[in-house]
């Protein structure tokens, strides 16, 4: 991950390339289209921060003020109901994307959508913490594409091409092996 990280920094100030991994901050501006549980949000943020090799600054889209700018930023839209016990969606009948990062002419853009209802349908979370952990892993996967500006995947960990229900609900740190 480190060489890619350095390449990303070249898009910003060159001096930042010498900064250590933990010193880089990436802002995630997020919004929920429907309902969400504060516990799920808290756990999603904790899991995303645990997995990603950069420091995350979280900001709600509604808290943005005019003229505010960021060096490194991603816009995340949480779709569907992000709450464990709200109208359980039907199980997925086919393989569908749990989230997607937007591209234009093959270029990865810093915009991603996370489909809460699909994550809930796949993982059948027993509580909001479990849902939040699953959402954090899905979000970290999309953030990997945004941070590396590529569609690359790894053989295992949260950056593998497909995340199963077990990958998303496993209570061990197994999915962090993608670094
Ligand atoms: Zn992917």
Image (tube, grey):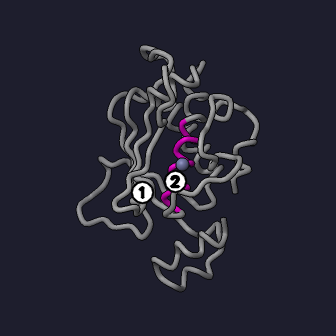
Residue 54 image position (x, y, % from top left): 59, 61
Residue 119 image position (x, y, % from top left): 51, 29
Which quarter of the figure is the C terminus placed in?
Answer: bottom right
- Relative to 13, residue 129 above or below: above
Q: Is residue 144 magenta?
A: yes
Q: For the residue carrying disc 2, how many other residues have a C-alpha within 10 Å: few (<14), some (14-19), or many (20+)?
A: many
Number of marks in picture? 2
**Camera-side residue: 1 or 94?**
94
Q: Are the two marked residues, 1 and 2, in contact with CB atoms closer than 8 angstroms? A: yes
Rounded to the nearest angstrom, the CA distance separating label 1 from label 2 is 8 Å
Residue furthest to the bottom in view is: 15
Give left or right: position of 171 versus 119: right
Q: Residue at x 55, y 80 (%)?
A: 16
- Relative to 54, residue 154 above or below: above
- Relative to 175, residue 90 above or below: above
Q: For the residue carrying disc 1, how many other residues have a C-alpha within 10 Å: few (<14), some (14-19), or many (20+)?
A: some
Residue 14 image position (x, y, % from top left): 51, 85
Disc 2 designates what residue? 143
Give left or right: position of 101 versus 119: left
Which quarter of the figure is the N terminus placed in?
Answer: bottom right
The stretch in magenta equals 135-147
Precedes in sequence: disc 1 or disc 2: 1
Disc 1 designates what residue? 74
Q: Residue at x 52, y 75 (%)?
A: 9
């Amino acid at each position: 991950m480190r060489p890619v990280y350095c390449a990303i920094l070249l898009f910003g100030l060159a001096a930042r390339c010498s900064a250590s991994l933990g010193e880089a901050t990436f802002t995630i501006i997020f919004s929920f289209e429907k309902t969400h549980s504060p516990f799920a949000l808290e756990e999603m943020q904790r899991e995303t921060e645990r997995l990603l090799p950069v420091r995350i600054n979280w900001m709600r889209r509604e808290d943005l003020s005019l003229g505010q700018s960021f060096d490194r930023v991603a816009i995340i839209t949480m779709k569907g109901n992000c709450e464990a016990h709200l109208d359980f969606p039907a199980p997925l009948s086919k393989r569908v994307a749990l989230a997607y990062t937007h591209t234009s002419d093959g270029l990865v853009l810093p915009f991603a959508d996370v489909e809460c209802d699909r994550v809930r349908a796949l993982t059948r979370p027993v509580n909001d913490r479990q849902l939040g952990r699953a959402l954090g892993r899905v979000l970290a996967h999309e953030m990997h594409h945004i941070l590396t500006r590529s569609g690359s995947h790894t053989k295992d960990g949260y950056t593998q091409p497909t995340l199963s229900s077990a990958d998303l609900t496993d209570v061990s740190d197994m999915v962090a092996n993608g670094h």
